[in-house]
Image (spheres, rainbow, N blue to C red):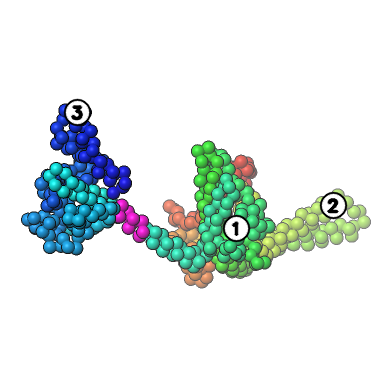
């Protein structure tokens, strides 16, 4: 019992006398009124442990609150339930601290202050934890006992739950440390206002800094690779900018760091908290060491480049006859014009205008031959992706020019349906040429032996976000059950096919951030199509669709 509550309980006889002098109520009424309204759970017991008076607060605590019953029955103590004399005759009374304290107060006048006891109450043995105080009280009817009770069961449960929670938290923290170490993922917290940066142990390890040091944002930037430093700083500045929430950029970035002279790759992602005025106050994020992943991606990219180059060379080999025919035309024209010029120069009466026209034709045919060789060299060239703003129609026209002679030899007509207003795309010209070239050659092969041989290449704008290219043929088509497999490596519908062309196409298109697919045509044949992300739609150009 608190000292103030205890003083309230002990002082009530004095208050009774004062009230008696100033009011007409009987002493019993005054006692009952004052005692019952004490804001604590107090029982006044007689020499047999029966309840003489009880506060309202105590009534809310006890299972029974009638005057005259023993306090053990009132509490509903499980061990006193079957005892006709209540707690006084309970066989377990010798082991009960509460019973010993009540008896001690009555028999020897001992005072027990704020002791804790656990009781099992009710038939279901519900655990009840009490803080109790017991003191003797002498009244006209003889010696009694004042018993103060405070139910701390819920507090004990909360303390137990808190202890379990603390243990779980400690365990979770240890597990988090182990998990961060295994996954190479660290965490960090930045107080934007005070510029206080906190790192987890794994974050210190990733950045190669002793855990005893105090990191700062400026110190973090010093670790970032010089070529990435401005990008990282701008990205964070954009994430904490005091602008409308809808316009804020998330902080999600991959960049390089330099640790002990070694370049490493990390990925960072964070959430920023803002106050009511839209100002950034703190940021919480993760940092992951992705060096191994980046190294694997580079190796994979290198292998893809090698495979794509092999495929280009193989495709060009298939077009050897057509290329030779195409190259032979300007060379034959150059030879014929040179011979004609030679004959003119042998005449005494030289017609200079005719000679000039012949030399102009020679120059024109020479350029034609040169362009064919340039296209061949470009397709043979082994190089990294070079993403530039491109007009997709230009790429289509270049491929059509390259395969026109092969189409003539195979008696295939080529139609172009090119969009007049298309967004530019960010792409590698040679890689896109390879995709369209491979789709065209596949269509040529699919139309071998067919009566109707038509190829149609279309380009179109798909909303403001994408550009679509489709290659439609009148060939043998593809079974719909093969749609999901046709882009898998080594899957081919041709008996002599290697099954790598379409898988390479898929890798190239996905590297460009696009998608590739296939569908059947209503009148036979198949249409392969791919989409590419459009650059800002304001870069759209009006073109001559031819």
Q: Position of residue 298 (x, y in %)?
A: 60, 66
Closer to us: 249 or 223: 223
Q: Which mark is residue 254?
A: none
User: What's the distance in space between the residues labelled 2 and 3, CA to CA?
Assistant: 140 Å
Q: Position of residue 155 (x, y in %)?
A: 31, 52
- Rendered view: 419 above or below 481: above
Crowd band around label 2 with a 10 angstrom C-alpha radius: few (<14), some (14–19), many (20+): few
Q: Quadrant of residue 312?
A: bottom right
Q: Main secondary structure of the magenta part?
A: helix
Q: Helix, strand or loop at disc 2?
A: helix
> Mark 1 falls on what kind of element?
loop
Are the residues flagged by discs 1 and 3 in contact, CB closer than 8 Å? no
Camera-side residue of 312 and 388:
388
- The residue that label 2 is drawn on is 356
Choose mark 1 or mark 3, whichever is in front: 3
Element marked by disc 3: loop
| Residue 44 locus on image (x, y percent) | 18, 46
Q: Which residue is mark 3?
A: 23
């Amino acid at each position: 019992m608190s000292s103030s509550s205890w003083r309230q309980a002990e002082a009530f006889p004095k208050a009774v006398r004062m009230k008696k002098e100033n009011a007409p109520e009987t002493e019993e009424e005054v006692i009952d009124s004052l005692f019952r309204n004490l804001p604590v759970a107090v029982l006044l017991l007689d020499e047999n442990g029966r309840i003489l008076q009880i506060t309202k607060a105590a009534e809310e605590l006890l299972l029974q609150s009638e005057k005259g019953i023993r306090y053990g029955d009132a509490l509903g103590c499980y061990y006193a339930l079957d005892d006709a004399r209540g707690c006084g005759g309970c066989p377990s009374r010798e082991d009960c601290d509460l019973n010993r304290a009540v008896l001690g107060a009555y028999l020897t006048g001992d005072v027990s202050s704020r002791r804790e006891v656990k009781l099992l109450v009710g038939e279901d043995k519900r655990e009840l934890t009490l803080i109790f105080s017991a003191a003797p009280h002498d009244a006209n009817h003889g010696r009694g006992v004042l018993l103060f009770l405070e139910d701390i069961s819920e507090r004990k449960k909360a303390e137990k739950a808190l202890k379990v929670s603390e243990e779980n938290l400690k365990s979770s923290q240890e597990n988090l440390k182990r998990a961060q170490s295994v996954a190479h993922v660290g965490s960090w917290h930045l107080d934007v206002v005070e510029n206080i940066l906190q790192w987890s142990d794994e974050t210190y390890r990733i950045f190669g800094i002793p855990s005893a040091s105090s990191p700062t944002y400026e110190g973090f930037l010093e670790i970032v690779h010089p070529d990435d430093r401005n990008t990282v700083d701008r990205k964070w500045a954009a994430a904490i900018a005091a602008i409308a929430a809808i316009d804020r950029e998330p902080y999600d970035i991959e960049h390089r760091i330099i640790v002990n002279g070694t370049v490493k790759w990390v990925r960072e992602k964070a959430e920023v908290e803002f106050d009511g005025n839209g100002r950034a106050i703190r940021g919480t994020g993760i940092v992951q060491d992705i060096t191994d992943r980046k190294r694997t991606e580079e190796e994979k990219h290198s292998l893809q480049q090698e495979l794509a180059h092999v495929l280009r060379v193989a495709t060009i080999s298939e077009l050897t006859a057509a290329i030779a025919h195409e190259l032979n035309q300007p060379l034959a024209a150059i030879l014929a014009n040179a011979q004609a010029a030679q004959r003119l120069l042998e005449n005494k009466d030289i017609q200079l205008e005719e000679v000039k026209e012949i030399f102009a034709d020679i120059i024109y045919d020479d350029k034609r031959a040169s362009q064919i060789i340039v296209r061949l060299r470009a397709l043979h060239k082994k190089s990294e992706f070079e993403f530039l703003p491109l007009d997709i129609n230009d790429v289509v026209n270049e491929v059509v020019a390259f395969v026109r002679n092969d189409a003539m030899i195979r008696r295939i007509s080529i139609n172009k349906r090119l969009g007049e207003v298309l967004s530019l795309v960010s792409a590698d010209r040679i890689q896109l040429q390879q995709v369209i070239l491979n789709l065209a050659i596949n269509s040529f092969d699919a139309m071998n032996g067919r009566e109707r041989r038509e190829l149609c290449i279309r380009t179109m704008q798909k909303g403001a976000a994408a550009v679509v290219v489709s290659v439609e043929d009148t060939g043998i088509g593809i079974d719909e059950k093969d749609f999901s497999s046709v882009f898998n490596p080594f899957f081919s519908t041709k008996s002599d096919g290697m099954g790598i062309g379409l898988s390479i196409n898929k890798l190239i298109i996905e590297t460009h951030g696009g998608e590739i697919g296939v569908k059947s045509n209503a009148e036979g044949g198949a249409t392969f199509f791919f989409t590419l992300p459009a650059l800002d739609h304001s870069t759209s150009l009006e073109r001559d669709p031819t």
